[in-house]
């Protein structure tokens, strides 16, 4: 990865000037300067206006706005403008449209109307990319290229005939011999044996349960296919203007699982991520903290760029919750605390027309004279004040393992319980660790685990053969490993690891389970330490481990629910939130992890900088000595942070408990 493209902790936004008359543009620049906007993302959805007819380009208006931005001292993250093809292209080539698993075409009239495998789309898109690169690659305002937009948003998976052919080519490349595919997919089951790759289709709707490895490979193919598309645009850009770094904005979120971003990361010059609070979830800010920690994991610990977020409500949830006063600053600083070196938003000015006209922006419909714009100005000032934080690294004692392949496989159908959802399990344990006052890096199972005191492995259903030995090394050096139910069950082909559950981790955990006994929705069981649990139990016996807690009722009274084999813990059920929290605290304390903060008060360290984010309703007091950067005041011994407020302290000394 190259050096970060923007200065300090930059404030940025998507800018769509084509939605406004030219007379508004000078005011835009002036207001951007007032707010301290350091960069804008330009051109994301501009294709139809930049190339109004095939091969005829109109860059005049774009030159003009780029000139205004540059004169105004605002840098540009230049989109390649290929996210939404113009109507002339989809009209001429309907074969490039995406098709769903039922065979329905998804028609134009929205955005991202293109199949990731379409050669005709690629040809036209790369021609535009080359034009953009030639015209703007040397422009002094352009600091970063932004390939397409959120690759995979709306069109991450396509089941059309073009995709089918590309899938077959991907399979032939992966397996070489169709008999290898037959073994891997277990096609002896239900007469699914293939005589040739030509017989394979994408997993379209079937009368009964589809082959799970077929589904898993299709998920892998779809991720690879879009990465291949990214590389094609990136290569054009690098050929023409090699000095400008290239990225695309990832969508690492709890409702989007179609890209394996660990495999994408090495192709990015800087990791960029979009994040919107999801008010459909029970713990909205915990999810933000989790996603930020995962983004940092994808970035290998390096600072990353928050490319999009919302100043207030979005427009795409059933009820779009607005941010209350102060939340914009607090939520933005949470991203920075967890590794972001820029905070950007969709979008500069709230649209007058179109499908996103009720989405919040930096300049709301009410205009400059609004609480929102005043908060944006305040945020810009705060980010400027903490600019020296840029480049510092988050300090974490805990690793929590995350894997897209495991997500895809865990959430397939025909499992012991459809109630077991990978993301739920991961969120629950990440929240418990965070609320207990620790910081977790969310990393790939193949990451280097040597620096962590605790490694949490929530419901990691699919694992390769290297993970159990890596976890055994953590335990051997005195680190703690905490594994939860339905982990280590299958190999990377989604084949069961035989001999008893939890397959890959039996020896590490010193347990063996013969049968799963999931609980009906709403049913709970009681543990002999007073806790309760739901969702999952299993017929577990110890083989070296010590029993920490057992069931007193439910289908398996007297059976172990929580065990430990030295410092290797197994949680064979879904503990209630209080019991999860208590166990997390116990493990962190035994492992010697320093805990600061609590549920509602996040304390996160980036190098010598201590972030205190107080979401609670009471004042928080945190021990630290140094300088609070937003106010510029000295802090001696401890900092008091009012409810709903935040502080960023350059610590003179890192004290015990900080
Ligand atoms: C993102 C997208 C933006 C905008 C935003 C609204 O997914 O990249 O263009 O649509 O959502 O929340």
Image (cartoon, rainbow, N blue to C red):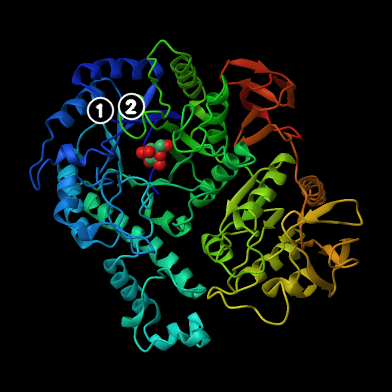
Categorize mark 1 by other alpha carbons within 10 Å: few (<14), some (14-19), many (20+): some
Q: Which mark is residue 260?
A: none
Which residue position holds label 2? 351
Q: Residue at x 62, y 23 (%)?
A: 647
Front-lying residue, 506 or 370: 370
Dividing the picture into quarters, in which one does residue 422 lie?
Answer: bottom right
Q: Is residue 33 above or below residue 267?
A: above
Residue 205 to residue 187: above or below: above
Pointer 2 local density, CA inside 10 Å: few below 14, some 14–19, many at least 20: many
Regarding residue 4, the answer to whether it shows in the image is no
Please tell me which residue lies in front, 125 or 214: 214
Considering only order in the chain, which callout, 2 or 1, is on the residue closer to the N terminus? 1
State the image coordinates of residue 463 (x, y, percent, origin top left). Answer: 60, 69
Left or right, 418 with respect to 404, comes to: right
Q: Tell me the residue that label 1 is attached to.
A: 19
Q: Nearer the viewer, residue 72 or 322?
A: 322
- What residue is rendered at 29% in x and 19% in y? 29
Q: Is residue 228 left or right of residue 339?
A: left
Residues at discs 1 and 2 in contact (Cβ within 8 Å):
yes
x%, y% of residue 536?
Answer: 74, 62
Work out which residue is located at the far left of the displayed protein and give it. 56
CA gap, disc 1 to disc 2? Answer: 7 Å
- Give the secondary structure at mark 2: loop
From what the image shows, is residue 358 above or below residue 35? below
Image x and y of residue 608, in percent: 61, 33
Name the quarter showing ligand 1.
Answer: top left
Q: Is residue 414 left or right of residue 383?
A: right
């Amino acid at each position: 990865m190259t050096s970060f493209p923007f200065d300090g902790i930059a404030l940025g936004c998507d800018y769509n000037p084509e939605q406004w008359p030219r007379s508004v543009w000078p005011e835009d620049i002036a207001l951007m300067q007032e707010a301290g906007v350091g960069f804008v993302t330009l051109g994301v959805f501009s294709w139809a206006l930049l190339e109004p007819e095939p091969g005829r380009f109109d860059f005049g208006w774009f030159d003009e706005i780029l000139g205004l931005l540059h004169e105004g001292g605002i840098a540009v993250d230049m989109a390649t403008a290929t996210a939404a093809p113009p109507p002339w292209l989809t009209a001429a080539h309907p074969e490039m449209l995406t098709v769903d698993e039922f065979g329905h075409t998804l028609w134009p009239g929205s955005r991202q109307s293109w199949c990731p495998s379409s050669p005709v789309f690629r040809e036209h898109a790369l021609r535009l990319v080359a034009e953009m690169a030639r015209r703007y690659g040397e422009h002094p305002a352009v600091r970063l290229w932004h390939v397409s937009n959120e690759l995979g948003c709306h069109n991450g998976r396509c089941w059309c005939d073009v995709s089918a052919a590309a899938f077959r080519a991907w399979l032939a490349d992966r397996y070489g011999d169709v008999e290898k595919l037959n073994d891997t997919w277990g096609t002896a089951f239900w007469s699914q044996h293939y005589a040739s790759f030509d017989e394979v289709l994408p997993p379209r709707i079937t009368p009964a349960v589809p082959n799970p490895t077929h589904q898993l490979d299709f998920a892998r193919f779809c991720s690879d296919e879009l990465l291949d598309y990214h590389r094609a645009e990136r290569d054009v850009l690098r050929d023409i203007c090699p000095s400008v770094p290239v990225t695309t904005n990832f969508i690492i979120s709890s409702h989007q699982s179609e890209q394996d971003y660990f495999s994408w990361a090495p192709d990015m010059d800087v990791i960029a991520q979009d994040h919107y609070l999801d008010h459909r979830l029970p713990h909205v800010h915990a999810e933000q903290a989790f996603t930020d920690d995962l983004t940092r994991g994808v970035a290998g610990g390096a600072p990353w760029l928050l490319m999009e977020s919302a100043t207030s409500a979005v427009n795409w949830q059933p009820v779009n919750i607005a941010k209350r006063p102060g939340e914009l600053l607090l939520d933005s600083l949470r991203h920075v605390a967890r590794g972001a070196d820029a905070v950007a938003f969709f979008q500069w000015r709230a649209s007058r027309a179109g499908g996103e006209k009720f989405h919040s922006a930096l300049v709301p419909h009410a205009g400059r004279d609004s609480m929102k714009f005043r908060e944006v100005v305040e945020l810009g000032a705060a980010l400027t004040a903490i600019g020296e934080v840029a480049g510092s690294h988050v300090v974490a004692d805990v690793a929590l393992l995350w894997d897209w392949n495991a997500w895809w496989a865990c959430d397939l159908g025909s499992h012991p319980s459809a109630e077991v959802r990978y993301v739920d399990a991961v969120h629950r344990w990440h929240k418990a660790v965070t609320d207990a006052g620790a910081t977790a890096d969310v990393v790939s199972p193949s990451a280097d685990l040597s620096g962590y005191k605790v490694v949490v492995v929530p419901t990691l259903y699919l694992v390769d053969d290297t993970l159990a030995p890596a976890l055994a090394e953590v335990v051997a050096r005195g680190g703690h490993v905490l594994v939860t139910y339905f982990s280590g069950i299958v190999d990377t082909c989604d084949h069961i690891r035989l001999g008893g559950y939890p397959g890959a981790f039996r020896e590490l955990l010193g347990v063996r389970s013969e049968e799963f006994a999931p609980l009906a929705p709403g049913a709970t069981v009681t543990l002999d330490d007073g806790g309760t649990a739901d969702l999952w139990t299993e017929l577990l016996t110890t083989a070296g481990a010590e029993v920490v807690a057992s069931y007193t009722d439910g289908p398996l009274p007297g059976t172990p629910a929580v065990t430990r084999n030295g410092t290797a813990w197994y949680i064979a059920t879904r503990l209630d939130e209080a019991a999860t929290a208590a166990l997390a605290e116990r493990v962190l304390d035994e492992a010697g992890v320093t805990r600061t903060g609590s549920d509602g008060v996040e304390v996160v360290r980036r190098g010598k900088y201590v972030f205190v984010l107080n979401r609670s309703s009471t004042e928080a007091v945190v021990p630290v000595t140094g300088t609070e950067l937003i106010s510029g005041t000295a802090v001696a011994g401890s900092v008091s942070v009012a409810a709903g407020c935040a502080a960023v302290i350059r610590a003179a000394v890192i004290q015990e408990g900080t």
